[in-house]
């Protein structure tokens, strides 16, 4: 690491230089008894750390540190002085360390170790700021999001370009043949025009995605195309599903993790698009969510957290209104709580929802409801 030294006393400056030379991986770019920083701007900008005396004749060390940080905001500040009363003021300036004269080697080594950790941290932060990642949101609205920035909606030249890209994304990293694409998107025109439309549409997709060329790309492969997602690109549904499959068992210590996991599902999958080829994936994801929500609801029910159990059973019905288990458990909860009107309401809702799908009501539920009716005042 590169360092510079300031002290108005030549002997103290030379002693500090001598001690630092005994420490590995330290390069001294300069040592100065003056505070004329305009004459040494290059050294300041190249430095990782400055050791400076608090008491300087023209400009005290605290003020000098402020000036140095204006030139190099990443500069680590280490104060060296014979007066410990400056310590609080030094650390208010976010000094990395504070050394008392004379500087002993063992103490200096600890300072350099601290400086090493600071340099590693700085490198990590710089890498994180310099790196970019793309998350493609497909649960709910379809958007692109770079790092933690605002979500972006891609401007598509044509509906064909948008729809074909979504199809590529749905089958990313797999080859989609030209015949398959034409059959699905351009079958209402003659074959020659269909191929022409295909090539134009591929061009329009590539143009729309120019700003994201370092994150994903479309390749000509054999007799078709493949959308390749680079390592810095992810899809929110895949992240969510991985978290679901690796989640710990539900218990008192992990229940909040499962609450958060279910809330982080912003489905349905590509909710604004009504393509037939989306339906099976949309249903699969909803089924995963519903099954896990029911597990969580039953955990709360088994442990007599009736309010939270009812919340998740109701959340389940918002996604899958015909779910008999959720209706049945809610009926039982409301019966136990004395909310007879809600019991009847859920029974009627369930019958209505099942009739719309031409499905019969479970005999068990029907018997339970009529037994409850006979034994209650409702």
Image: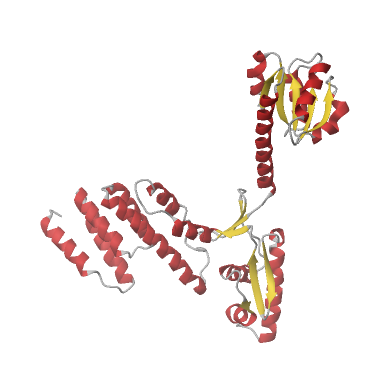
Colour pattern: secondary structure
Identified at 71% across, 14% down, the residue is: 82
Farthest residue toward the left?
375
Q: Position of residue 206 (x, y in %)?
A: 70, 67
Tell me if 237 is positioned left or right of 312 in this view. right
Tell me if 59 is positioned left or right of 268 in this view. right
Q: Is 302 placed above or below 277 here?
A: above
Tell me if 355 is positioned left or right of 336 in this view. right
Q: How many marks?
A: 0
Q: Is residue 75 visible?
A: yes
Farthest residue toward the right?
39
Q: Position of residue 299 (x, y in %)?
A: 31, 53
Q: Is residue 8 visible?
A: no
Query: Residue 20: which quarter of the image?
Result: top right
Q: Position of residue 239 (x, y in %)?
A: 52, 58
Q: Is 12 placed above or below 28 here?
A: above
Seen from the viewer's position, the closer of residues 151 and 11 is 11
Seen from the viewer's position, the closer of residues 160 and 260 is 260
Quarter of the image where the C terminus is located: bottom left
Q: Position of residue 30 (x, y in %)?
A: 84, 28
Query: Residue 203: which quarter of the image?
Result: bottom right
Q: Is 368 placed above or below 105 here?
A: below
Identified at 36% across, 52% down, the residue is: 250
Q: Is 158 placed above or below 248 here?
A: below
Identified at 79% across, 28% down, the residue is: 4
Quarter of the image where the N terminus is located: top right
Tell me if 100 is positioned left or right of 187 in this view. right
Seen from the viewer's position, the closer of residues 105 and 259 is 105
């Amino acid at each position: 690491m590169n360092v510079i030294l300031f002290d108005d006393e030549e002997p103290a400056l030379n002693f500090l230089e001598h001690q630092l030379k005994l420490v590995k991986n330290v390069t001294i770019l300069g040592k100065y008894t003056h505070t004329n920083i305009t004459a040494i701007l290059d050294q300041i900008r190249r430095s990782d750390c400055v050791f400076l005396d608090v008491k300087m004749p023209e400009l005290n060390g605290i003020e000098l540190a402020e000036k140095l940080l204006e030139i190099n905001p990443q500069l680590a500040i280490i104060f060296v002085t014979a007066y410990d009363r400056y310590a609080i003021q030094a650390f208010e300036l976010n000094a990395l360390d504070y050394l008392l004269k004379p500087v002993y080697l063992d103490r200096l080594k600890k300072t350099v170790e601290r400086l090493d950790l600071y340099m590693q941290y700085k490198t990590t932060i710089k890498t994180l700021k310099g790196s970019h990642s793309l998350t493609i949101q497909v649960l709910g609205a379809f958007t692109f999001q770079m790092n933690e920035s605002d979500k972006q909606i891609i401007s598509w030249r044509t509906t064909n370009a948008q729809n074909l890209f979504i199809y590529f994304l749905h089958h990313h990293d797999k080859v989609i043949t030209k015949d398959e694409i034409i059959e699905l998107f351009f079958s209402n025109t003659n074959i020659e025009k269909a191929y022409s439309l295909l090539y134009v549409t591929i061009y329009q997709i590539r143009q729309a995605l120019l700003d994201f060329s370092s994150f994903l790309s479309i390749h000509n492969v054999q007799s078709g195309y493949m959308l390749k997602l680079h390592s810095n690109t992810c899809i929110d549904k895949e992240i969510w599903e991985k978290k679901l499959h690796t989640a710990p068992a539900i218990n008192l210590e992990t229940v909040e993790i499962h609450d958060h996991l279910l809330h982080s599902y912003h489905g349905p999958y590509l909710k604004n698009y009504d393509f037939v080829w989306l339906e099976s994936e949309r249903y699969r994801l909803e089924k995963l969510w519903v099954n896990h929500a029911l597990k969580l609801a039953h955990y709360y029910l088994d442990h007599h957290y009736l309010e939270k159990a009812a919340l998740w059973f109701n959340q389940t019905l918002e996604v899958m209104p015909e779910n008999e288990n959720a209706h049945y458990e809610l009926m039982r909860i409301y019966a136990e709580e004395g909310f007879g009107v809600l019991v009847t309401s859920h029974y009627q809702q369930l019958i209505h929802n099942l009739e719309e799908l031409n499905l019969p009501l479970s005999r068990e539920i029907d018997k339970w409801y009529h037994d409850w009716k006979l034994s209650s005042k409702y």
